[in-house]
Image (cartoon, helix red, strand yellow):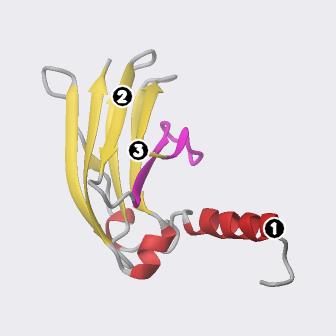
């Protein structure tokens, strides 16, 4: 890119990196089209799930958790050192995300119902055929 200034090259590189971080949810096969896994809170207000993702075909897992309006919980996703796994949260019956591309979030339920947590790999990791093991932890606060 000799015809671009240094600042423009940095911008182009940053923009390209951002595009690679977009999840490949639409093209996902397997668990993304299966029924979500329902998570239950134990007596201490903790719900956990462990899973593995492998590009390019198994790149999304969905989990659900039931919350009542006003309840709060902390969501945390740990994928070790790979840093290619994130989650989105969808409120009951909504197609729009409440949180986007995070590894930690505080969720305050605005309505009674079932919230969906979608765990996914970044597009760059999917295209490389990467694998990721993760642990999702939801703690009522």
Mark number displayed over residue 74: 2
Lateral position of residue 37 relative to residue 73, left or right: left
- Would residue 118 be counted in the magenta stretch? no
Residue 84: quarter of image: bottom left
Looking at the rendered image, the quarter that the N terminus falls into is: bottom right
Q: Secondary structure at mark 2?
A: strand
Looking at the rendered image, the quarter that the C terminus falls into is: top left
The one of 62 and 33 positioned closer to us in this rendering: 62
Residue shown at 76% from the left, 71% from the top: 9
Q: Which residue is mark 1?
A: 8
Range of the magenta residues?
84-101
Residue shown at 52% from the left, 69% from the top: 26
For residue 40, say whether it is visible.
no
Give the spatial CA distance, label 1 vs label 2.
39 Å
* Percent coordinates x, y for residue 139 in the rendering: 28, 27
Q: Secondary structure at mark 3?
A: loop
Give the spatial CA distance, label 2 vs label 3.
11 Å
Q: Which residue is mark 3?
A: 103
Which callout, 1 or 2, points at the residue further toward the start of the chain?
A: 1
The one of 138 and 82 positioned closer to us in this rendering: 82
Within 10 Å of disc 3 (Cα), the crowding (few <14, some 14-19, many 20+) is some
* Percent coordinates x, y for residue 42 in the rendering: 14, 27
Give the answer, above or below, for where 99 lies relative to 30.
above
Mark 1 and mark 3 residues within 8 Å of each other at the beta carbon: no
Give the answer, above or below, for where 139 lies relative to 59.
above
* Percent coordinates x, y for residue 67 in the rendering: 36, 26
Give the spatial CA distance, label 1 vs label 3.
30 Å
């Amino acid at each position: 890119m000799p015809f671009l200034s240094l600042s423009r090259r940095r911008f182009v590189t940053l923009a390209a990196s951002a595009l690679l971080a977009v999840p490949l949810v639409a093209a996902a096969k397997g668990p993304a089209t299966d029924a979500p896994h329902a998570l239950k809170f134990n007596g201490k207000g903790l719900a956990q799930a462990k899973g593995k993702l492998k590009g390019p075909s198994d790149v999304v897992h969905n989990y659900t958790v039931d919350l009542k309006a006003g309840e709060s919980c902390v969501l945390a996703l740990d994928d070790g050192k790979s840093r290619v796994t994130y989650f989105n949260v969808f409120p009951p019956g909504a197609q729009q995300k409440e949180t986007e591309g995070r590894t930690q979030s505080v969720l305050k339920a605005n309505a009674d119902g079932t919230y969906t947590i979608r765990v996914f790999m970044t597009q760059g990791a999917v295209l490389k055929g990467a694998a990721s093991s993760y642990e999702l932890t939801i703690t009522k606060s």
